[in-house]
Image: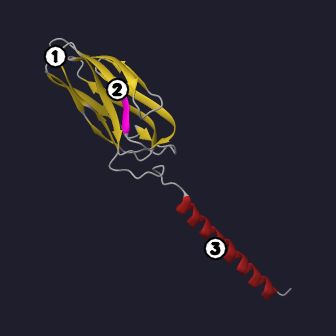
Amino acid sequence: MSKKKIAIISGAAVAAVALLALLTVYLVSVFSPSDSGGKESTGKPTISAGTVTASAGDTVKVPIEFTGNPGAMGFLFDISYDADSLEYITYEKGELLSDCEVSGGDGALKLLSVENENITDDGVMAYISFKVKDGASGDCAVKVICEENSVCNYDEESIAVETSDGKVTVK
């Protein structure tokens, strides 16, 4: 075989490999789910505390909600509350998470959850139960505090989230 024929065959082989690589990249990009688990987000990811109304002596449940979910699996953030007016009692896992833990007290709580895969729905992460102390009045703040790496996806990529504070309004 001549050198000219070998050069032509080699060039054709390189072109075929390059074409195959481009085709593979195209097919992967077309048929793979997006980073959001195949669901388009409806807004900026936000973790918010709800607002409820109560009387002194009542026990209330404040929902902690995640909306605008781009596909997340790990959560670690703080919840602060007015300890002069509210006493932390307990928490219940919300409908969004398969499991979560809330710990702390005296005005500062920490919520932790690690899911098995990205969740893509919006919903309530947990319900925080407080007893409204005698003598409490007005608005008692319940704040969500997220740091830079408070939320991440399955690939361990940080998800920037906004927060929205809630309150217990004592009537």
Give, as a single range, the part of the protein colored magenta: 123-127
Q: Residue furthest front?
A: 95
Q: Residue at x 61, y 65 (%)?
A: 24
**How packed is label 3: few (under 14 Cα within 10 Å), some, or many (20 or more)?**
few
- Residue hosting label 3: 19
Q: Residue furthest right?
A: 1
Q: Amino acid at mark 2?
A: Tyr
Q: Is residue 122 positioned above or below 113 on the image?
A: below
- Tell me where residue 106 appears, x and y as whole percent: 30, 17
Judged by depth in the image, the label closer to the viewer, 3 or 2, is: 2
Q: Residue at x 71, y 80 (%)?
A: 12
Q: Is residue 2 positioned above or below 40 on the image?
A: below
Q: Quadrant of residue 108?
A: top left
Give the CA separation, mark 3 to mark 1. Answer: 71 Å
Q: Amino acid at mark 1?
A: Ala
Give the CA separation, mark 3 to mark 2. Answer: 54 Å
N-terminal of the pair, mark 3 or mark 2, is 3
Q: Main secondary structure of the magenta part?
A: strand
Q: Quadrant of residue 51?
A: top left
Secondary structure of the residue carrying tag 1 is: loop
- Residue hosting label 1: 136
- Residue hosting label 2: 127
**How packed is label 2: few (under 14 Cα within 10 Å), some, or many (20 or more)?**
many
- Tell me where residue 114 appears, x and y as whole percent: 49, 33
Q: Residue at x 52, y 45 (%)?
A: 155
Q: Residue at x 39, y 44 (%)?
A: 69
Classify the position of the C terminus by image quarter: top left
